[in-house]
Image (tube, rainbow, N blue to C red):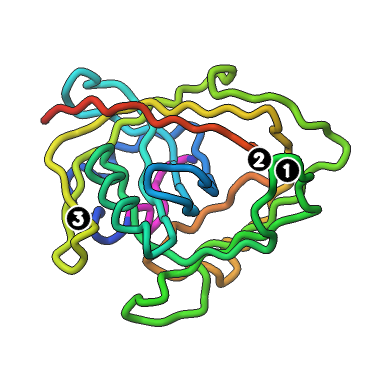
Amino acid sequence: MRGPLPVDIYDPLESTHPACSAREFKGGIGMVMVVRYFDTPVGEYDELVVIPGNFAVPGGPEKGQEKLRVTRIYVNQRETTYNALSKGRRNWNIPKHLARFEFSSPPLSKTASPPKAITVTVWPPADYKVRTEIPFFKATFTPMSWTPSFPLSTSYLPISSHFVQPPLPSSDDDPALTGTETWKSYDVSSWSNRAKMVWVRSEQGRDVVARGWCPKFTPWSLGVVLLDAEMVVGEAREWTV
């Protein structure tokens, strides 16, 4: 993604923090990830992640470097939300918020073939103060029929999977939206023996964006899905600036 950053790249809660200045954005390869977790310490849940690219690190052991940053991330499942939200925010400075998810296909078994296409739709949570049926994210993923599955690991890729996250403010209205006071860095690794190239059709920009919930952007029409993937988020290193 190139600068300037789009409107709503941060949630209004996080956007007020001095560390979330747009001038720290340095560009680079960004990504949008949709993840369905089936085995985690806080149970099953779905997740939408927005990673615009690299941001300058203003201090600490990585001062002056440009590192990836998660600016928007949503999880579902009210029964696991408190743990998913508070632990993600507290342990890694990941700015998690609650949303509603809908998938056009049920979760796949380890031996099942992917569907011909799957549409993912994400809305503000059902208990949000202003009820809306306008999703803020909607995309359809269609596997390429002429390409086989292949093994893929982030260790194969020539790009970094190291993140540096600024401190998070807390919410006066939701105790799950905990705040932090230190910067945190961590590594993410993932791998799958069943990666598949997919076409991506996004409805971003066609009256789908619910203002204040998701940045308006135009993703690439090409993506990759990792079936039966393993993902590990490393222990965070923290410091003050």
**Residue 115 lies in magenta, yes or no?**
no
Relative to 35, is 27 above or below?
Answer: above
Which of the 4 quarters of the picture holds residue 68? Answer: top left
Say if 196 sits above or below 137 in the image: above
Q: Which residue is mark 1?
A: 198
- Secondary structure under the numbered disc 1 in the rendered image: strand
- For mark 3, give the secondary structure: loop
Q: Are marks 2 and 1 in contact (CB under 8 Å)?
A: yes
Find residue 208 and report its horizontal and vertical position in percent.
55, 69
Q: Are marks 1 and 3 in contact (CB under 8 Å)?
A: no
Q: Residue at x 59, y 23 (%)?
A: 153
Residue at 36 percent of width and 30 percent of height: 163
- Determine contact: label 2, label 3, CB under 8 Å: no
Question: Front-most of 233 and 141?
Answer: 233
* Distance CA(mark 2)–CA(mark 3): 34 Å
Label 2, label 1: how far apart the Cα atoms are = 7 Å
Residue type for callout 2: Val
Closer to the eye: label 1 or 3:
1
For the magenta stretch, what is the residue range?
2-10
Q: Nearer the viewer, mark 2 or mark 3?
A: 2
* Residue 175 percent coordinates (x, y): 18, 61
The picture places residue 154, in percent across and down from the top left corner, at 54, 24
Task: Give x and y (percent) for residue 219.
Answer: 59, 48
The amino acid type found where label 1 is placed reads Val
Q: Name the N-terminal-most of marks 2 and 3.
A: 3
Q: Nearer the viewer, residue 154 or 166?
A: 154
**Label 2 sits on residue:** 225
Q: Residue 4 magenta-drawn? A: yes
Q: Amino acid at mark 3?
A: Thr
In the image, which disc is placed on residue 16? 3
Tell me if 140 is positioned left or right of 166 in this view. right
Query: Left of 184 or right of it: where is 54?
Result: right
